[in-house]
Amino acid sequence: MAPGRSLSLVTSRTALVGMVVGVALGLSLKPALLFVFPALPMRLTTLGPRARSMTAMGATIAEAPSAQRVGLEQEEQEELRGKEEELAELEKLVVQGDMNAHFRLGQALRKGRWIEQDFDRAFELILEAAEQDHVRAQFMTGLMLIRGEGCEVDVETGMNFLTMAAEEGLAKAQNAIGMLHLMGEGPDGEDLLSAAFWLKKAAEQGNAEAQYQLGTMLLEGHGLESNATWAASFFEKAALQGQAEAQEAFAQLLWKGVGVPQSKAQAARWFSEAAEQENAEASFCLGCMLRTGE
């Protein structure tokens, strides 16, 4: 018996309609040292002049700006100046009607890394490019409409823009529209035939997420005729690209010998790969294998 659960479709709508914002915080060396070792200087003063001298020397070294740190600060300042110049140039190109500049400046405003974040203007710029058949802008307009970034949520119109980009061959748009049909987010609800059609298009272009989802549909016969061999093939392709869920799914098939020749050694390999990416099911299965000595 396999150590894991049966495979199921991953249909979390947060994969497409949610937006994740990451914030990195830095802590300078001196506050960090004082926080970790608040009593260290007081304790060393009881050890005599030599200890006090060493402590003072260490503090001087810690506070002195290193050549490396100065170099990094200069590099960051130069990069910032370069980005400011690039943004100023994009503004000029936008005025001239350059649609690629519309898209790039819109993306900068949406992300807010080198410029103050402004979803409203970002949406306006990207939409203008999308309406002029800029494929990546069509994809992003679709996502922004579905998420409500700088606009009212409008899933149906968002799907229309995604479909435009998908029809132009953009794999991530094909995957997105396929997933929306799979999750029943469209005006007609769940549409498995459309889901399979677009996921297959994206999978054939090497989109790992689409390969995993298509493999799951094939394995479970969900909207497609069940075919474990084809499912294993798509899982393997996605697994080789580092898709953790596909790695775990492929390992399950290898463990059971479903769609592929049974190989517990290869199953352990792929469980391990997925576990390193913090896939809980793979970690559990790998633990079971280690405990039973398989």
Image (spheres, helix red, strand yellow):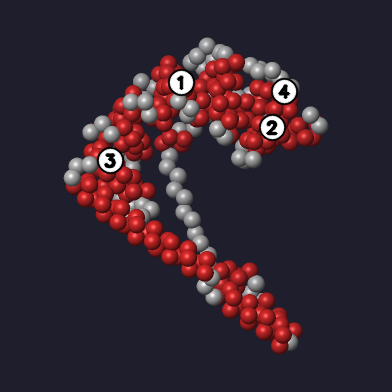
Q: What residue type is labelled 3?
A: Asn
User: In 3D space, how far apart are the residues under numbered discs 1 and 2 (Cα atoms)?
Assistant: 27 Å
Q: Can you see residue 195? A: no
Q: Name the residue under label 1.
A: 200
Q: Mark 4 points at which residue?
A: 263
Q: Nearer the viewer, residue 178 or 263?
A: 263
Q: In which quarter of the image is residue 218?
A: top right
Residue that lies at the very extreme toward the left in this rendered image: 96
Among numbered discs 3 and 1, the one appearing first in the sequence? 3
Q: Which amino acid does label 4 sit on?
A: Ser
90, above or below 181, in the image: below
Among numbered discs 2 and 3, the one appearing first in the sequence? 3
Residue 100's mark? Answer: 3
Q: What residue type is labelled 1?
A: Lys
User: In 3D space, how far apart are the residues under numbered discs 4 and 1 (Cα atoms)?
Assistant: 27 Å
Query: Which of pointers 2 and 3 indicates the residue nearer the eye?
Result: 3
Secondary structure, mark 4, is loop
Q: Which of 115 and 8 is in front in this view?
A: 115
Q: Quadrant of residue 52?
A: bottom right
Asked if labels 1 and 3 touch by Cβ distance under 8 angstroms, the answer is no
User: In 3D space, how far apart are the residues under numbered discs 3 and 4 (Cα atoms)?
Assistant: 50 Å
Among numbered discs 1 and 2, the one appearing first in the sequence? 1
Asked if labels 3 and 2 touch by Cβ distance under 8 angstroms, the answer is no
Q: Residue at x 51, y 30 (%)?
A: 208
User: In 3D space, how far apart are the residues under numbered discs 2 and 3 (Cα atoms)?
Assistant: 44 Å
Among numbered discs 3 and 4, the one appearing first in the sequence? 3
Residue 258, how many percent across, how many down?
66, 17
Q: Name the residue under label 2.
A: 269
